[in-house]
Amino acid sequence: MPSQSEGAYAAATRHLRKCQPQMRSLIEQVGPCTLRPNPNYFVVLARTIVSQQLSTRAADTICGRLQSLLGGRSWRPEQVLKTRPESIRDCGLSAGKVKSLLDLAQKIVDRAVPIRQLAKMEDDEIRACLLAVHGIGPWSVDMFLMFSLGRPDVLPVGDLGLRAGVRDLFALPELPGPAAIEDHAEPWRPFRSIATWYIWRSRGVVPQSKPNGSNHAVARRKRS
């Protein structure tokens, strides 16, 4: 269950530069990796729920309204549960996303999601835990593993930005599916998170890239 350190980023970059000429060119174009974990686990998970299937601009707008409603950047699950669902929905969330946000907050308070223990858990354990929350799917878990826990070898095969980036990087005739993504990414192991970051960064905005997690999506997301 390793996370990234400065030395690990350097090792990842060296590995990726050697594994494929396309990746070497991409790294030279983008420069040093600036991916840094955000330790506010609840905020990252909540923002990931908000950003599902939304453009960056729409997600940022809604998150700004939620931030004002909840009184600042460091949202807490207790705050969410004390807030009227109608007020949360008025920020621009669908009924389904309000339900997801409330379910996440309740499960954290009830310790069904042991938020303080997640960093000590294996990836598969975290997936099983978070997928039990209403509305959280594989993409949302991947974002959490990458942007909160800094896990180095996550490959979000359902991410549209990654699919488009792999298509462009390898000059493919169409958007690759999950199996093709896995094949092209095999040489990136055990640093697929870093390679994914480079592909996102080459295309523009990286999900959750600012310290407060205010960037969410490169493009619209197809999966939760």
Image: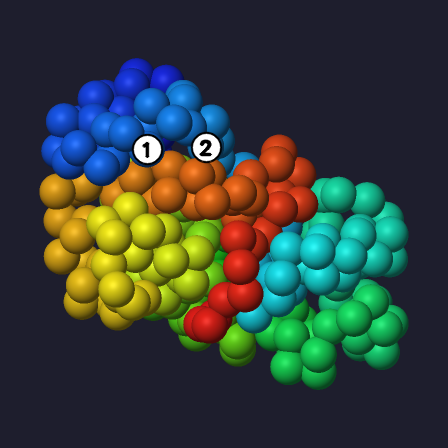
Residue 217 visible, this orientation? yes
**Residues packed near mark 2 inside 10 Å, few (<14), some (14 to 19) or many (20 plus):** many
Residue 156 numbered mark, or none: none
**In the displayed structure, would residue 141 be above or below residue 223?**
above
| One can see residue 70 in this view | no
Q: Please, what is the three-letter code of the amino acid marked with disc 2?
A: Leu
In the displayed structure, 12 sits above or below 162; it is: above
User: Which residue bears the numbered disc 2?
Assistant: 35
| Mark 1 element type | helix
Q: Residue at x 71, y 79 (%)?
A: 94
Query: Could you say where residue 47 lies in the image, as x and y percent from the top left?
Result: 62, 56
- Quadrant for the N terminus, please: top left
Where disc 2 sits, the SS reads loop
- Colour scheme of the rendered structure: rainbow
Q: CA distance from mark 1 to mark 2?
A: 16 Å
Residue in the foreground of this view, choosing between 22 and 127: 22
The residue type indicated by label 1 comes to Leu
Q: Position of residue 81 (x, y in %)?
A: 75, 67
**Residue 26 numbered tag:** 1
Could you say where residue 18 lies in the image, as x and y percent from the top left?
14, 27
Q: Residue 174's spot in the image, x, y percent?
A: 29, 67
